[in-house]
Amino acid sequence: MWNRRDLMMAAGGLGLSFMLPKLSPKAADKRGKERPKSLIVMYMAGGPSQLETFDPHPGSKIGGLAKAIPTKNADLKICDLYPRTAEQIHHLSVIRSMISKEGDHERGTYLLKTGYRPDPTLKHPSLGAIAAHELPNKDIDIPMHVTLGGGPFPARGGFLGDEFDAFKIFNPGNNIQNMESRVSKDRQDRRLENLSVVSRVFRKGRRLQTENTLHELTIERALAMMSSDQLAAFKIEGESDTIKKESEATKKAYGDSRFGRGCLVARRLIEEGVRAVEVVLPGWDSHANNHEGHITQANILDSAFAALIKDLADRDLLESTVVLWIGEFGRTPKINALDGRDHWPTGFSCVVGGGGIKGGLVIGETDPTGKEKDPKDPIEVHDLYSTVLHMLGVDYELEVNTPIGRPMAYSQGQPIERLLAKS
């Protein structure tokens, strides 16, 4: 006997089981603390330099050309390339002492998306996949785990199943491919009626075989998604009446870039009830011309990051949305012969907040002389991710049986107590 959860998970193996939260209009009007929790991960693919983002050391041997500017948090100065972010970052906390044992892009990305180091015998689920799996909602017709903007190593469902892989959209804000019928409604209806006749004939004497294929269920869900008003959350451009318009001022605030549009779509998806959204900004691998490269990246990131945090706060969404800004590692204090910085998995930065996580903290410290490799107050990736899962309302210690019967906990860390208490 199949129950509803079994059917949803099995259908996902065919690529259509994202049926999990949509808020009712009534719930959507309530204040943030009454909404279900969601997650936005802003993933900086390639490894951003902590010294040119949230841990500048101007005037020091390792500081390079970066300068520091104050923020609304008296205890925090950030790189001068981020003036808009400086106006909003007091809502969040900065960790300057993240540590990792993975200095390779692929392995580092695996660790920073799952909280586990790569294991050849097992594929771990990403944070977003865990959130979608553990916090379902039957009223959503669109994917519950989405990644926007591409990137070489997308978030995966791991041992939870491929149905929890992130739904990938390379160019956010435009119409999604293959979501509209290529024929008229009348012709589509005739096709579906003919298919129904064939299905009924095939089902005779083959009920169990038919149910096990999940063919009819898959078609049903595909059609539900194609006709759902929720698809409008993905689109900020176009002439369709179903598109929920954004003002020109709002679109300008986020910036006319793939990442900026991705952050705007992320906010719209969270409003719709999607559980987990990843927005990827590639291009941080600055082995040469590090400062110039970070100027280019900051011109994209600063406006989008600031607009997203402001929007979430203004719309009473920040209390119900955990926001995590992170990359796979940082950059070396030493500037190399090509004016670049190399991979540095020790003492890099992340920004986290929302969803009840305490804002306004600055955790950890790196040595401005570059002599001390290890940061003060080091924070392990798995402890950060236990914190995120805990604040989402997920049992981070829950053991799930993998397809081969191996019990695995969602996280091997413990929540960071300083981040748990609300300000």
Image (cartoon, rainbow, N blue to C red):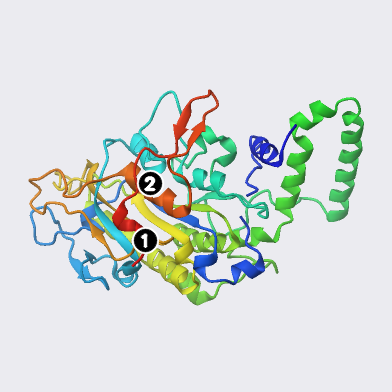
Q: Residue at x 49, y 47 (%)?
A: 128
Using residue 327 as the reference point, say whether residue 257 is left or right of it: right
**Tag 2: residue type?**
Tyr
Q: What mark, if any, has residue 352 been given in the picture?
A: none
Q: Which is in the foreground here, disc 2 or disc 1? A: 2
Q: Which residue is drawn at 11% across and 54% down?
A: 368
Q: Name the image quarter holding the N terminus.
A: top right
Q: Is residue 366 visible?
A: yes
Q: Is mark 1 on a helix, strand or loop?
A: helix
Left or right side of 348 for 130: right
In the depicted structure, whether residue 120 falls above or below residue 218: above
Along the line of sight, the residue nearer the viewer: 139 or 281: 139
Residue in the image at 21% along x and 58% along y: 55
| Residue depicted at 25% across the width and 71% down the height | 71
Camera-side residue of 52 and 291: 52
Q: Could you tell whether 346 is left or right of 36 in the image?
A: left
Q: Residues within 10 Å of mark 1 (few under 14, many from 20)?
A: many
Position of residue 399 measured from the top left corner of the image (x, y, whole percent):
47, 35
Q: Where is residue 337 in the image (x, y as percent from the top left)?
A: 14, 44
Q: How many marks?
A: 2
- The residue to which callout 2 is attached is 385
User: Label 2, label 1: how many angstroms apart (C-alpha)?
Assistant: 23 Å
**From the image, which quarter does the C terminus lie in?**
bottom left
The label on residue 301 is: 1
Q: Which amino acid does label 1 sit on?
A: Leu
Q: Residues within 10 Å of mark 2 (few under 14, many from 20)?
A: many
Q: Is residue 255 visible in this depiction of the protein?
A: no
Q: Is residue 20 above or below residue 315?
A: above
Q: As drawn, is 127 to the left or to the right of 275? A: left
